[in-house]
Image (spheres, rainbow, N blue to C red):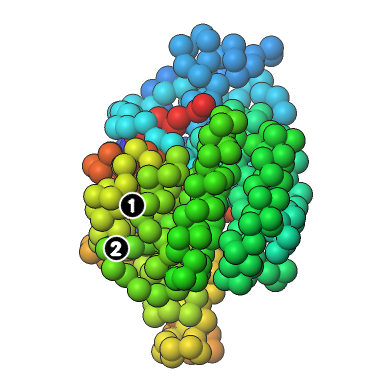
Amino acid sequence: MTIHVVKEGDTLSSIAAQYGVTAERIIIENELPNPEKLVIGQSLGIRVPDVVHTVVQGDTLFSIAEKYGTTPNRILQNNPRIAVNEALNPGEVLVITYQGDEVRDTLVINGYAYPFIDRAVLRRTLPFLTYLSIFTYGFTPAGELVPIEDEELIAIAKEFGVEPIMMLAPMTADGAFNSQVAHQMFTNPTAQANLINNIVANIKAKGYRGLDIDFEFVLPEDKQNFLNFITAVNKRLDAEGYLTLVALAPKTSGEMTGLLYEAHDYPTIGAVADLVLLMTYEWGYTYGPPMATAPLNNVRRVLEYGVTVIDPNKILMGIPNYAYDWPLPFVSKVTAAESISNQKAIERAAQYGVTIQFDETAQAPFYNYTTAEGVEHVVWFDDVRSMQAKLALIPELKLNGAGVWQIMNYFPGLWLVVASQYAVTKE
């Protein structure tokens, strides 16, 4: 894959001619929201088809894959739009291979989704995933699970060879993390035993592959309690052949203080869990100063610390799939950013006719615009360039893979990089 950054005077036709592809191919690959109005500084993933197949009556993904010595999943990765169809359409042209694609590494990729995810988005994304973590089960002080509507997502995931992962989080009815919910469970042995029994029973009943423990803002005094809970869960799940995954706050040392960090002890939790997600995002956040959500320099610092105290083969690097739009001037505790998709960020840049800039340190794109009412805004987002830079850390640091928070919007910039440079593990 070649990354083309739009410059002044570029048109879709001129770019297509430069690389020997059709304009339609560029539109399809990048799901361009602005084909008639490209933005200076916008990045495009350019892949040149090598082998193509025209569907005929009776073709199936399996028969086509067998003909070309590939896999149905690989065909879906190269043609994600067909994942939403019940059957192949005669006359449709499928790309089997692209020129220059070269596998750099094999990755485990976990995607996080809410039960209400658009099913078309889900189906297009699943070919790129190993696991699907469904957000989220809660629990009561007595250890009873607060269920979610997950059956349909589990079934769809399995259609694509993706293993579903049950998520557990101490949350209030309005969806906020609650330290006391966790504390009450930690300090009540009967409730904790009941919760673990209910987790195991639910995993078996629903066909989950394991459990994703997402306990944020755990009280510092519950640090050992949290570890004891993870250990107890892992012991039960391991005996049954299930995985234990734990999400951890982004730390750069073992001495970091604060409610988000202190109970997330990298060495001890990393030694117990099968996998850990290092949540390397949210430097730029809703109420924070405008900046990249996951600046590469900050992400690197967390991962470089992480691999010194946790087996790298257990680590999943967190990848954000969203952007933020801040009104300016920023006022602490007053200004709130709007969360938008990365594709919406490009669409908005085209709407206001601005130039996209690229921060080399953060390895992230951004731009400013002014509304008709005279309010200035700044938008930080991710594109194919920033995704390529982030994913390159995985083979460099010999990590296991990535966890994408979240897959509610389809992000072609990310999946173009994955499809052209990596192989995704399927259990």
Query: Pointer 1: residues within 10 angstroms few (<14), some, or many (20+)?
Result: some
Q: Secondary structure at mark 1?
A: helix
Residue kind at label 1, given as amino acid type: Pro
Which residue is the site of mark 2? 254
- Figure disc tally: 2
Quick one: quadrant of the N terminus?
A: top left
SS at mark 2? loop
Mark before the other along the chain sequence, 2 or 1: 2
Contact (Cβ within 8 Å) of mark 2 with mark 1: yes
Where residue 87 appears, x then y in whole percent? Answer: 70, 24
The relative height of residue 392 versus residue 347 in the rendered view (above or below) is: above
For badge 2, the amino acid type reads Gly
Q: Nearer the viewer, residue 424 or 83?
A: 424
Q: Position of residue 53 (x, y in %)?
A: 52, 18
Q: Is residue 142 left or right of residue 423?
A: right
Please indicate, yes or no, whether residue 64 appears anywhere in the rendered image. yes
Q: Dot 2: few (<14), some (14–19), or many (≥20) neighbours within 10 Å?
A: some
Q: On the picture, is 320 further left or further right than 300?
A: right
Residue most extreme to the top: 67
For label 1, the residue is 267
Q: CA distance from mark 2 to mark 1?
A: 9 Å
Identified at 27% across, 63% down, the residue is 253
Relative horizontal placement of residue 344, taking residue 40 as reference (left or right): right
Residue at the (56%, 14%) spot, across then down: 64
Residue 410 in the image: state x and y as whole percent: 55, 49
Above-or-below relation of 421 to 119 = above
Looking at the image, residue 244 lies above or below residue 422: below
- Residue at the spot 72% in from the left edge and 28% down from the top edge: 86
